[in-house]
């Protein structure tokens, strides 16, 4: 055993300037035992605090331990298996991407994409979780552990610099598994790297050829701060079940003595400067102003990992990134999918919260397809690469309701599935009513079965019967109730009318149209004045405001370009609006302070726009 | 009904509130102006407890003080399962008593550091913090080995005992006294398990588990 009186001679310590820059290395930051179901582990590496949590999909998140709102430690928050919620004001962050998905104080809005926590790489190896500030390559390979069956010993925190701990480890003694009670083993040390050492203990009774009575352990030293470390030791072989507890205790006792020796030694040395973790700015990709969007942008490249028939005429697509991890989305979000035939179509994500391993959409083959759904059904195959936009959310879900009614007609079920999966882990009351023509049209059985009793299917109802059913479902508005509707136009109109009649206020009725079936009247001509740009433009018959703005070099985002999605909205300062979109609610139309520039026009001669 | 002479921010009073909540025993809280009024040091209060400290209970005329003594009484009287204070299992009872004494240590170190920071008590803060770390280090190792044995609690039983309740608040409030639990992951997991007990109750600084 290490003699606790053995003090470290500072001159024998490795000169810190010769060490590899620790920020470029992988370090162990936790053991797998530290990450039980729904726990948030509180860790530290190189002076930086981290919150480490395992989601229900087994993804291990290593995050800066700091809420982007008020800086409270995320490790005292809650892990609901898909999202981590800050204890202070309930900001929710997505598994994997660490993007903020919900801000309770702004329940009707989608959070800004810049609200994304700093994440660190995480790899599981040898029963340990490895991470690093900016690690290069892969975690260290230790042949003895690769060839063996790693068995994690108890980790020990030490109030001593890592190099003092390693110095003590070079003199460390333990016994092989077969002779724990003796104290005569021969020790051999092998340096692994600047932060790890392998020690083999061989009983004196064994011969060169018979090494049955020998045990090897690899000791990884995690540099917590300049003056603190954690010893994470792994045996190369799993002891027999009956011996395990004894082995663990043997090592805990031996290392306990080493800890005292290391701390005594460290106390003799001048205290090192504490490490200061740098706080980075949000990534450039998130922080820069979006590039001028003269056309619809498709910055992401995804591969069709799976294409499957989920119902009659409905095909599911699973899209995985071919580049960086996929960005955060919120329930209700949609993607622009750029098709090989040049068309651009919008599809809602069906993903549950915190799941950005892939994006999953459902595509219905439209009988009157103008080439969009046909192309996806008939041309696009597994393995193909598509260009898509980032997820955009014009249909945000409130997560503070006492009751949420989700009404889906046909393929309108897709955003509702995402919403239902977000509400469920939060324990918020919701019901999903899924209207379809026939049983064989019901899609995404695998998601619906997970949602259980919350889903009711209404199959084969006539329009009148549908209306009667909707009237029954929406009978009785209560405080903090919300209804979300997505489906074919006529059903949506019916549902909105019924909700209004049943006393649902406009603000509680949320809807998303597949498309705008209104015949667009673009025969008018009028002037637009751009108040901020001090520019006057003429919009002639046959051209939209959006086209005129772009023709004049003004960057404008857009998505569906038919008045359904709400992306090309512009604030209006003055002038009467001829609304031709299906995105705005009646109250929003009446307010007269915003316009969908792709289809809507001036009702008079002139509009003053706030751009 | 049991009367609890109580102070909201006191870890020792919270031990009683938590125990009665876990046992589903109704009680009446009698607030004592512990800080800044020092009501527990008044002649009036010393008629209730001549030692001049809280918590104190009055159960239908039976008056008892000292946090850990009250836990013994409450569990012995109001827990029909006999789990919380295992009177019928001498070995486990001895273990429970031993860890209750350990809890005196955490109270006198970790919770004392909290009184120093929050209520300006005149303690040797460095000694309090060093003592708390010494005990937490032992407890973390103890609980880590318990987990390896498939056991979740301080004593070697499949259920918690009053020892868990006596130690829990001192541990979970320690950051207020400047005693970090970063080095004690097994201790943090154990606090999660306590919070998951049916009937668990909270106090300022002690958060509930989970979302719903």
Image (tube, grey):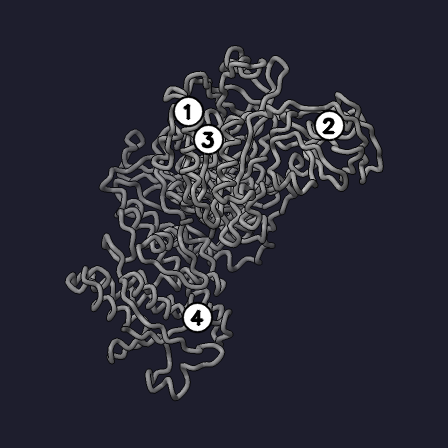
- Which is nearer the eye, B201 or A597? A597
In three-dimensional space, the C-alpha distance between marks 4 and 2, rounded to whole angstroms, equals 68 Å
Q: What element carries label 3?
A: strand
Discs 2, 1 touching: Cβ within 8 Å: no
- Which one is earlier in the sequence, the residue at label 2 or at label 3? 3
Q: Which image quadrant is residue B59 in? A: bottom left
- Which is nearer the eye, A103 or B77? A103
Report the residue that reaches farthest toward the top. A378
Q: Is mark 1 on a helix, strand or loop?
A: loop
Location of residue B190 in the rendering, given as x and y in whole percent from the top left corner: 35, 53
In three-dimensional space, the C-alpha distance between marks 2 and 1, rounded to whole angstroms, equals 39 Å
Residue highlighted by disc 3: A408
Residue highlighted by disc 4: B112
Residue A483 seen anywhere in this rendered image of the structure: yes
Discs 4, 2 touching: Cβ within 8 Å: no
Q: Mark 2 lies on which chain?
A: A
Residue beneath the point at 30% across and 77% down: B65
Q: Which image quadrant is residue A604 in? A: top right
Location of residue B48 in the rendering, given as x and y in whole percent from the top left corner: 33, 83
Q: How crowded is mark 2: few (under 14 residues within 10 Å), some or many (20 or more)?
A: many
Residue beneath the point at 36% across and 58% down: B138
* Labels 1, 3: front one: 1
Q: Mark 3 lies on which chain?
A: A
């Amino acid at each position: 055993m290490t003699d606790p009186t053995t003090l470290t001679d500072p001159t024998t310590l490795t000169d810190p300037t010769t060490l590899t820059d620790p920020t470029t290395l992988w370090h162990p930051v936790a053991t797998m035992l530290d990450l039980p179901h729904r726990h948030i582990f509180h860790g530290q590496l190189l002076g930086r605090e981290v919150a480490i949590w395992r989601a229900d999909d087994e993804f291990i998140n290593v995050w800066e331990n700091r809420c982007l709102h008020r800086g409270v430690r995320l490790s005292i928050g809650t892990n609901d298996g898909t999202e981590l919620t800050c204890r202070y004001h309930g900001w929710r962050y997505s598994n994997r991407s660490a993007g903020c998905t919900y801000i309770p104080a702004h329940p009707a809005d989608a959070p800004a994409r810049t609200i994304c926590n700093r994440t660190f790489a995480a790899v599981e190896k040898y029963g340990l979780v490895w991470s690093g500030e900016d690690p290069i390559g892969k975690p260290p390979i230790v042949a003895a552990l690769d060839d063996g069956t790693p068995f994690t010993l108890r980790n020990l925190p030490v109030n001593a610099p890592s190099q003092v701990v390693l110095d003590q480890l070079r003199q460390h003694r333990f016994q092989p598994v077969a002779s724990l009670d003796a104290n005569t083993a021969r020790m051999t040390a092998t340096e692994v790297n600047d932060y790890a050492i392998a020690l083999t203990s061989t009983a004196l009774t064994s011969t060169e050829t018979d090494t049955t009575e020998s045990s090897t352990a690899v000791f990884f030293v995690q540099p917590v701060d300049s003056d603190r470390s954690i010893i994470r030791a792994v045996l190369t072989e799993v002891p027999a079940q009956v011996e395990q507890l004894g082995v663990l205790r043997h090592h805990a006792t031996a290392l306990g003595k080493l800890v005292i020796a290391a701390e005594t030694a460290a106390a003799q040395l001048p205290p090192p400067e504490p490490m200061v973790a740098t706080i980075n700015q949000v990534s450039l990709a998130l922080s820069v102003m979006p590039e001028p969007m003269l056309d619809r942008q498709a910055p992401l490249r995804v591969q069709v990992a799976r294409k499957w028939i989920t119902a009659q005429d409905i095909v599911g697509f699973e899209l995985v990134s071919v580049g960086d991890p996929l960005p955060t989305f919120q329930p209700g979000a949609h993607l622009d999918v750029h098709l090989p035939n040049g068309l651009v179509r919008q599809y809602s994500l069906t993903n549950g919260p915190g799941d950005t391993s892939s994006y999953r959409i459902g595509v219905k083959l439209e009988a009157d397809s103008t080439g969009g759904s046909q192309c996806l059904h008939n041309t696009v195959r597994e393995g193909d690469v598509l260009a898509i936009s980032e997820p955009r959310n014009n249909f945000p879900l409130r997560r503070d309701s006492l009751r949420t009614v989700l009404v889906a007609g046909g393929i309108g079920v897709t955003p509702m599935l995402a919403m239902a999966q977000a509400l469920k882990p939060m324990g918020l009351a919701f019901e999903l009513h899924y209207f379809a023509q026939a049983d064989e049209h019901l899609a995404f059985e695998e998601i619906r079965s997970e949602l259980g009793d919350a889903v009711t299917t209404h199959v084969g109802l006539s329009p009148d019967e549908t209306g009667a059913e909707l009237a029954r479902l929406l009978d009785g508005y209560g405080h903090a109730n919300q209804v979300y509707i997505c489906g074919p136009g006529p059903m949506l109109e019916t549902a909105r009318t019924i909700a209004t009649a049943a006393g649902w206020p406009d603000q509680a009725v949320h809807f998303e149209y597949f498309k705008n079936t209104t015949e667009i009247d673009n025969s008018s001509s009028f002037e637009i004045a751009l108040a901020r740009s001090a520019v006057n433009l003429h919009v002639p018959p046959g051209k939209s405001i959006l086209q005129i703005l772009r023709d004049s070099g003004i960057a404008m985002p857009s998505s569906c370009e038919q008045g359904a999605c709400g992306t090309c909205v512009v604030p209006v300062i003055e002038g009467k609006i001829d609304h031709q979109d299906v995105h705005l609610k009646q109250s929003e139309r009446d307010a007269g302070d915003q316009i969908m520039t792709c289809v809507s026009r001036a009702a008079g001669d002139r509009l003053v726009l706030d751009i | 009904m049991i009367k609890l002479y109580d102070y909201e921010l006191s870890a020792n009073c919270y031990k009683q509130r938590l125990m009665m909540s876990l046992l589903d025993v109704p009680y009446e809280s009698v607030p004592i102006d512990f800080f800044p009024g020092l009501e527990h040091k008044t002649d009036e209060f010393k008629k209730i407890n001549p030692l001049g400290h809280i918590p104190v209970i009055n159960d239908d005329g039976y008056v008892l003080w000292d946090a850990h003594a009250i836990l013994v009484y409450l569990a012995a009287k109001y827990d029909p399962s006999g789990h919380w204070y295992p009177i019928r299992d001498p070995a486990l009872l001895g273990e429970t008593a031993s860890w209750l004494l350990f809890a005196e240590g955490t109270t006198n170190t970790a919770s004392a550091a909290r009184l120093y920071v929050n209520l300006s008590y005149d303690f040797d803060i460095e000694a309090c913090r060093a003592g708390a770390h010494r005990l937490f280090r032992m407890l973390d190792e103890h609980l880590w080995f318990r987990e390896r044995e498939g056991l979740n609690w301080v004593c070697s039983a499949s259920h918690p005992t009053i020892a868990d309740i006596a130690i829990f608040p001192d541990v979970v409030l320690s950051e207020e006294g400047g005693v970090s639990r970063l080095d004690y992951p097994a201790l943090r997991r154990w606090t999660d398990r306590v919070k998951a007990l049916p009937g668990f109750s909270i106090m300022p600084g002690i958060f509930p588990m989970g979302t719903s």
